[in-house]
Amino acid sequence: MLSRVAESIYWMSRQMERAENLARFLEVTLNLTLDQPENLIDPWGPLVEVTGDTPAFVEKYGVPTQQSVVNFLAFDPDYHSSMLTCLRAARENAKSVRETLSSEAFEQINEFYHFVSDASASQITDPTAAFFDNVRQYSLLWSGILDSTMSHDMAWHFANVGRLLERADKTSRILDVKYFNLLPNVSDVGTALDDLQWSALLLAISGFEAYRREHHLVNIEKVVSFFLFHRTFPRSVRSCVAGAHWSLSEIEQMSNSDEPGQAIAQIEAIRHRLSEADVKEVITRGVHQFVDLVQIELNQIGESLNYDYFNAPRPV
Amino acid sequence: MASSSSQSQNSQSQSQRADGSSPAIRAPRLANYQCEGFFDELVDDRTVARPDAESLVALINSLPPEELLRRQNAIERSLYQMGITFTVYSDEAGTEKIMPFDVVPRIISAMLWQHIEAGLKQRIMALNRFLADIYGDQKIIDDGIIPRDIIESAPAFLKECVGLRPPGGVWCHITGTDLVRDNTGAVYVLEDNLRCPSGVSYVLQNRHVMKRNFPQVFGASRVRPVNDYPSRLYSMLQAIAPEGVTSPTIAVLTPGVYNSAYYEHSYLAQQMGVELVEGRDLVVEDDVVFMRTTDGLQQVDVLYRRVDDTFIDPETFREDSCLGVAGLMRAYRAGNIALANAPGTGVADDKVVYAYVPAMIRYYLDEEPILANVPTYICQREEDRKYVLDNLDKLVVKAAGESGGYGILIGPHATPVERAEFADKIRNDPRNYIAQPTLQLSRVPTLAGGNLEGRHVDLRPYILCSGPDDIWVMPGGLTRVALKKGSLVVNSSQGGGSKDTWVAAEEGQEIAPDWQDE
């Protein structure tokens, strides 16, 4: 397929996933503030930290409040990674590869974008608003449409790689930042355990019910393990990486190149480490350090895709 | 000039039922509608439905008044949801609009269509002969039919194309010809679009949404299908592949996502199942065109290019173009790629050259033109210029090199100051202007504020040509409608909209299947 098309599909898919994750974060946090009227901890600051764009936020809004954070993450047209800008960019990318997508897929992005772009900040700062429910429905529809109306050919695999790399990154980020805010010291494990807080964390990745079925009670070690190493839950880092690995191998197989690309080797390495890691050791050495490394490696895979498929035309 | 076209009109209005009853007794009258002295496509001057429009008029009469508007809104909403929109350039927020759509279709009788189709085929044949001649031996100039300086001063005449011989001698593979009907119902050719005519995607989408909203009347009206256009386009592109290539790689070349016709480019590529490429996706090596893919370079054999001539190759034409690919013309000359349409075809849709098309038909085919041109004054001719300058208040003046409704003076509607300005322009650059009498364009009932009012229309059928004997005319085309009351300007850039166009089938002809069958 055309290199430009592969790249646009990959980004379209990342941007859709990014928008969905932002909605998840905001929804969970709004629910959290409802359950916790005394505001024991500030839920809004960490949410900005998840993005890694705190300086941009502070410059424009100052102190994180419900209103300002919702504005920033959901509707800010100037912020390069707000839900609205992600959807707009995803739609632009979708437009540029429209002939490769199923009509249903394009129409879904188009409607999703119009829905969010027509909404106003005031609608969503009322936590009872149906807005986030709708957004989640749109996201689920999008995943379903992508999977069931497109051939699982090279284009779909590039979309899948984009979606899963983004998802792995976001799952690791939410664990990282929340982990530090909720439990700054390993010695606090078990003492300051707040069922509510950790449940909220699991809700953000739609993992609450799956976790409960396996472990029943909230336990920091098990939560960390669920986030990073769960073998089958579709939002755990390990499961995302495994899926991306599968799609990359399919792409490698479909392309006629003689030597394997860099990306496939890198993702094999992460996948291997995630399946071998021991959660106790990770917690002892520092969740943040572990997660940071995973994120850096995921980024490198993105760069390798550029080299392997999107840019340099390989000789015939 | 209009004799041949008005003839078919007469036979249409004189048509009689098999049972001998007068149409006026049985055919429904369109309620509360006024023709106001204009020729109407759906009803006669007593607002009685023309034969092929009877089911439609009966349906409209049977609907509660707000129902048409409701269906129109539903259709416009679904066009918006499908993202069939164009970006409004002047708007910084990138506002998107659909091309306004009118729910009342325009219906063309089988007999009138036969006449139009024959006329268009004849015209395309002559235009192709003309292009081959003008970039070849130039006999038509030597024989004194067209003055040399008219051709050589045409901005779209490309010296770089002289001596080129496109495969099969075909230059214009895809044409969109604009037709109008006047107060008597006579059909005239208003202009030929031989470069990158757009709008065919609207025809296909309009039909799609109309079928969903008016399935019953559709079947009853025996409408001929248009949805095989992408297959026909694909077959045509396949047929023009360079010699020896049996299964060609075909691609559509677009200027990119910011072009106002981008939706169409992407839609056609999708419907044909071929790649949609931009200039930056292509590279020419050793006179062979390749596209950059995830597997490396892949050869392209046929390009349906929707990029204007002078932008397709910075090496040959405009150096500053980033839309094309350097070396494309080298590959074309070497016979390694087919281009549709061939570069250089634009010379034949220069508005001054247009005036000579009837002469071309006589010269190359030794036939009388079936479809008439609108009478045209060429300002470069002294006599014509004098007449034009003396009668600006009666004429439409057009700049030869403009399109999209720009560079036009509609004399009767213009102020004296505007007319004086145009007179200066004509005196300063007579080669660039032609003038035509103001035609009272035919009208079609159109929703305006919930009521049906007559609005002026034109028609752009699309014609595919893969060889001198292989010309296909889409049954129907894009009916553009001037939505503003009294306006004669139908361009979408000037507030025009579109309508579905129904060509009635003759006995035994294929009709459009119900949408459920698709």
Image (spheres, rainbow, N blue to C red):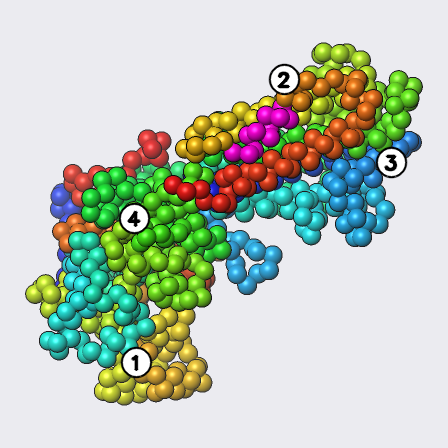
- The residue positioned 37% from the left and 70% from the top of the image is B402
What residue would you read off at disc 4?
A: B302
Mark carried by residue A42: 3
Residue B173 sits above or below residue A308 on the image: below
> Mark 2: few, some, or many residues within 10 Å (few <14, many ≥20)?
few
Mark 4 residue element: strand
Q: Quadrant of the N terminus of chain B?
A: bottom left
**Disc 2 versus disc 3: distance between alpha carbons?**
32 Å
Labelled pair 4, 1 in contact (Cβ < 8 Å): no
> Mark 1: few, some, or many residues within 10 Å (few <14, many ≥20)?
many
What residue would you read off at disc 1?
A: B431
- The residue positioned 43% from the left and 82% from the top of the image is B418
**Disc 4 versus disc 3: distance between alpha carbons?**
61 Å
Q: Amino acid at mark 4?
A: Val
State which chain disc 1 sits on: B
From where the camera sits, is residue A264 visible?
A: yes
Query: What residue range appears in magenta?
Result: A261-271
Mark 3 residue element: loop
